[in-house]
Amino acid sequence: MSSLSLKRAVGIPNVHRAYASAQACYSEHGVDTARALALLAEIPVSLHCWQGDDVGGFEKVGSALTGGIAVTGNYPGKARNPDELRLDAKAAFGLIPGTHRFNLHASYGEFGGKKVDRNEVEASHFQNWIDWARANNLGLDFNPTFFSHPLSNDGFTLAHRDKSVRDFWIEHGVRCRTIGAAFGKALAKSCVTNFWIPDGYKDTPTDRVAPRERLTESLDKIFKKAISSKLNQDAVEPKLFGLGSESYVVGSHEFYLGYALSRKKLLCLDSGHYHPTESIADKISSVLQFMPQILLHVSRGVRWDSDHVVVLNDDLLLIAREIVANDYSKRVHIGLDYFDASINRIAAWVVGTRNMLRALLVGLLEPPGIKQAEREGDYTMRLALQEETKLLPAGAVWDYFCETHGVPVGAKWLTEVKRYERDVLSKRS
């Protein structure tokens, strides 16, 4: 037994004792912790490939990021090829309790050193990803890549004035849906293929209508072919503004809300794509009145859409509570979307995902008396219980969840990351 394994074994009784005490405490508040943990184990989170290599992809080395995408930092050891990215992702998954998913962009295919343009990409370019996901019991999600390409450099793709440019990107979108369906078929887990485009103006436009008409027409062509939802589910993602599209975004929230409702697509709510004072938690129950499912991209915006690593703050707790308190876990697909190159990239995955799961657990552990007080119109009781709940021992329940799922408890996972950095990442030039 390794020294680290020995330390874990020694710590097990303490984890179990703390959990037993927490279980009794929550029981007094009408909460079944065993049920909460069983429900948490059934909720997958989709980890995003782009955190592992700073949104570089593998089409060609050194390609510049465009489309409002910006990554800051130069922490050593980023993945330089698909094998390294898969190795890094597996290391992260080994420190996260539960069974989850991996989210790929089209630019992360394996092209054998050949020039394969975006309108030529096929499922065969992702066969190694499929094999890896199957071997690790993961689902795969997918995204067309509408940025970092010569035909997106002027800030427009599907809403471009030039029909030939639009046709290029339409074909890319069509092929990406086919790839998503191939993922779903191969893994027997439906793939969510999410469409986000950077189209917009830096300064105030005189014509806001024509680009949206062109975008509608382009999307309709992409989605023309019916694909079983058992294989692939389409999502569309709005944005308030971005770098290079500060004054006008073609695919705004209102545009995609209308499109998703009328075309029966999933609406993607990205927590970094709205005003800094605006929470998407309130939007979840609103849109789910009218559509069966949605996609979430969870990130942390700091002053602008900066996609910081997810932390356990009020915004995250509110989002997670809305999902579990309203029994939406089967209707909400949870994905992460941030990229930080200033810290260890594996640690960024682990911190964000564990926080997402912790927030869901806090929601699952909410005493039923809070809702009951609200139903009875006792708002004094509601407020008092909401505040008292904040200091209930959720941490002990979380530690038990980690221990029983065979991953490090508390900050012990950092030891594994540091070892991996020493043995693997530090050797990358």
Image: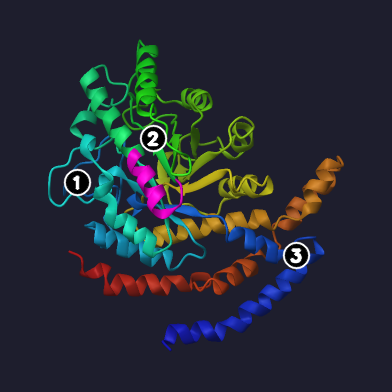
Question: Mark 1 to mark 2: distance in Å?
Answer: 19 Å
- Crowding around mark 1 (Cα neighbors within 10 Å: few <14, some 14 to 19, many 20+) is many
The alpha-carbon separation of the residues under discs 2 and 3 comes to 42 Å
Q: Does any portion of residue 345 appear in the rendered image?
A: no
Residue at the far left in the pictured view: 114
Give the residue displayed 49% in from the left and 61% down from the top: 99
Report the disc number at residue 195.
2
- Point 58% across, 32% down: residue: 291
- Position of the N terminus, as image quadrant, is bottom left
Label 1, label 3: how many angstroms apart (C-alpha)? Answer: 51 Å
Residue found at x 58% / y 81%: 12
83 lies above or below 180: below
In terms of secondary structure, where does tag 1 sit?
A: loop
From the image, which quarter does the C terminus lie in?
bottom left
- The kind of residue on which mark 3 rests is Tyr
Q: Which of 365 and 90 lies nearest the eye of the viewer?
A: 90
Which x, y percent locates residue 31?
75, 61
First in residue order: circle 1 vs circle 2 = 1
Q: Which residues are magenta?
A: 178-190
Of labels 2 and 3, earlier in sequence is: 3
Q: Earlier in the sequence, mark 1 or mark 3?
A: 3
What element does badge 2 sit on? strand
* Image mark count: 3
Q: In the rendered image, which residue does mark 3 sit on? A: 26
Within-10-Å neighbours for mark 3: few <14, some 14–19, many 20+: many
For the stretch drawn in magenta, the main secondary structure is helix
Residue type of the residue flagged with mark 1: Glu
Q: Position of residue 143 (x, y in %)?
A: 36, 41
Which residue has dot 1 on it?
A: 59
